Amino acid sequence: MQNSHKLALYLEETDTPIGRWTNFILSGFVLLSSAIFVAQTYPLPPEVDAILRQINTAILIIFSGEYLLRLWAAKRKIHYIFSLYSIIDLIVILPVFLGAFDISFLRIFRWFRVLRLLRFVEGQVFFGSYPEDSLIITRILFTLFSIIFVYSGLIYQVEHSINPEQFSTFLDAVYFSVVTMTTVGFGDVTPLSEGGRLMTVLMILTGIALIPGQLGALIKELVKNSNQVESRCTVCGLPRHDRDAQFCKICGTELKNN
């Protein structure tokens, strides 16, 4: 039990040096594997493509081991299995367990791998402790990046085989996604398949569903901060309080500068 608790601390917490480095390394593997997917949409020498496939397989095995370790260390295993992070992790490692059945279908799931960064963004692995408004901006940027990356990959995967002239590389799919998301709609690149059109609709709906809520949270936080002043609590260190505050809202200590 003690070993599982220590392992959970290293995997989930970023306050310790080991936990922070563990999450940094896992984040690096996510970015590396995503870069490999993008590179493989371009013509590559056979030997380079073979090396990238081996690296990708090794990363996938590492992710599978990480998932099993997280499951073993979880106190409430059923709750963990059905959590958002666990579902994302499971989608990512599906090729390891089902790869013998339908490789072409499972290639779709590789574009979801970048969503694993959500755990590290929420855990503030990259940025440490920052004001809430900065974290909200980070989440908005990550949401935009994730929507564009994932749906560009999915659209490329669906359209490339039947529409190779317009979707020859991942960058073509990114161009289409950005033009579509910004409602510019030049019309020079359009999906031909029903799957591509479905992905386009889902991309637009996902942006509409996720972005406004986060922008609303950012505006609310900015309005809240405009009514506060620098007034650091000498006990808990809370840096900002309401203009008319006489006591710290966290620990109740009297504010000396009021």
Image (cartoon, helix red, strand yellow):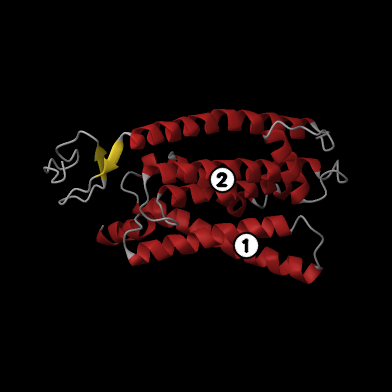
Mark 1 vs 2: CB contact within 8 A: no
- In the rendered structure, the answer to whether residue 79 lies left or right of residue 198 reads left
Q: Residue at x 58, y 28 (%)?
A: 208
Q: Amino acid at mark 2?
A: Ile
Q: Which residue is mark 2?
A: 91
Residue 57: assigned label: 1
Q: Position of residue 146 (x, y in %)?
A: 59, 44
Q: Secondary structure at mark 1?
A: helix
**Residue ranking furthest to the right:** 165
Q: Residue at x 46, y 44 (%)?
A: 85
| Residue density around tag 1, few if under 14, some if 14–19, many if 20 or more, within 10 Å | some
| Residue density around tag 2, few if under 14, some if 14–19, many if 20 or more, within 10 Å | some
**Residue ranking furthest to the bottom:** 47
Is residue 166 placed above or below 128 in the rendered structure?
above
Marks 1 and 2, how far apart in space? 15 Å
Evaluate whether residue 60 shows in this view: no
Total marks shown come to 2
The numbered mark, 1 or 2, whose residue comes first in the sequence reads 1
Q: Position of residue 48 (x, y in %)?
A: 75, 69
- In the rendered structure, the answer to whether residue 128 lies left or right of residue 118 reads left
Q: Residue at x 35, y 54 (%)?
A: 73
Q: Classify the position of the N terminus by image quarter.
A: bottom left
Evaluate whether residue 181 shows in this view: yes
- In the rendered structure, the answer to whether residue 128 lies left or right of residue 99 reads left
Q: Classify the position of the C terminus by image quarter.
A: top left
Q: Amino acid at mark 1?
A: Thr
Q: Secondary structure at mark 2?
A: helix
- In the rendered structure, the answer to whether residue 91 lies left or right of residue 223 reads right
Q: Position of residue 132 (x, y in %)?
A: 37, 43
Which of 105/125 is in front?
Answer: 125
Residue 3: assigned label: none
The answer to which image quadrant residue 20 occupies is: bottom left
